Image (tube, rainbow, N blue to C red):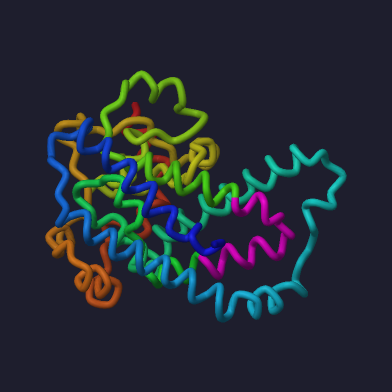
Amino acid sequence: MGYSFLFLPLFIVALVATFEVRLPRFTSPFKLSHFSTPLAFGLMGIGLSLLLSLTIQDFLIGLVAPFQILSIPQLPLPNWLGFILCFLLIDFANYWLHRLSHMIPALWRLHKIHHADKSVSAATNLLHHPGELLFGYLVMLTFFVVLGMPLLVIVSYGLANQIHGTLVHGNINYPTKLNDYFKYIVYMPDVHRIHHSVDMIEGNSNFGQIFPFWDVIFGTHQESAVAPVGQFKMGLSHPEQDIPFSILSLLALPILSGKNSHSEGAVQINALSLHEIND
């Protein structure tokens, strides 16, 4: 019964996809053929999670446990404050994991398939290379054990992140005024979509998972795209823009693709570039 939780991302995507069909933000229609590729990667992710939990997870926890530096539940804090602290720390760690995935060439080669989708939708949230998922699993497992994160917070964050991650990629029409109301509270689809721009000056921004204030603090926040919604283009930059959006092509992308100099390392100048754009 517990492992049924692994299939929750598929259920959330299917639910949001029904709204994408009825209320699309962009005019491009929903295509089942396009949906099938992220779905396949979602199933691969579920299989990998199941395999890791049944085989090496306990061993890895035991391996990292001697390096635990504190136990957050034992800090002299009210339970509710400890929960919020842990929740924010997990999101902070995810911000840096995501940002480093754009800065470090080897990690970018794995992460770039998430940016290969030219028609970002709820299903795009499933589009991650198994190698990237494995690396993220090892980093976050270590992070959880070293800080003694409570299981309740880990599960709660995972659920919130899955729901928000699907919605923030969703091709759903909604009142744009909501972008102003929530711009410093939680990422909205129009703002996150900038991260999927073919222009990697824009693509190297808005790394936050749920909360935008990490990007604000570290100078990687961009509130609006240069191009209007109707002309905004998403996907990888040239020459990788024309890579077939298929399972085998995307699986092989980290090995077969060359360095994309327009994206790797661009984040170092991102803060200056964003100020120039906004000015």
Question: Is residue 194 on the magenta stretch?
Answer: no
Q: Nearer the viewer, residue 201 or 121?
A: 121
Give the left or right position of residue 197, taking residue 34 as reference.
Answer: right
Secondary structure mostly taken by the magenta-highlighted segment of the chain: helix
Magenta region? 137-155
> Does 159 sit above or below residue 213?
below
Percent from the top left, x then y, of residue 176? 32, 22
> Does 92 sit above or below residue 21?
below
Position of the N terminus, as image quadrant, is bottom right
Percent from the top left, x then y, of residue 185? 52, 30
In this rendering, does residue 155 appear at all? yes
> Does 99 sit above or below residue 140?
above
Residue lying at the far front in this picture: please name it: 1
Residue lying at the far right in this picture: please name it: 76
In this rendering, does residue 201 appear at all? no
Give the left or right position of residue 92, taking residue 74 as reference.
Answer: left
Q: Nearer the viewer, residue 110 or 81?
A: 81
Position of the C terminus, as image quadrant, is top left
Question: Is residue 142 on the magenta stretch?
Answer: yes
The residue at the point 17 percent across, 55 percent down is 34
The residue at the point 31 percent across, 57 percent down is 114
The residue at the point 27 percent across, 33 percent down is 172
Percent from the top left, x then y, of residue 90? 60, 51
The residue at the point 53 percent across, 53 percent down is 94
Percent from the top left, x then y, of residue 46? 42, 66
Q: Nearer the viewer, residue 91 or 258?
A: 91
Question: Which quadrant would residue 144 be assigned to in this image?
Answer: bottom right
For the image, the number of numbered tags is 0
Question: Which quadrant would residue 189 be assigned to in this image?
Answer: top left
Give the left or right position of residue 266, taking residue 219 as reference.
Answer: left
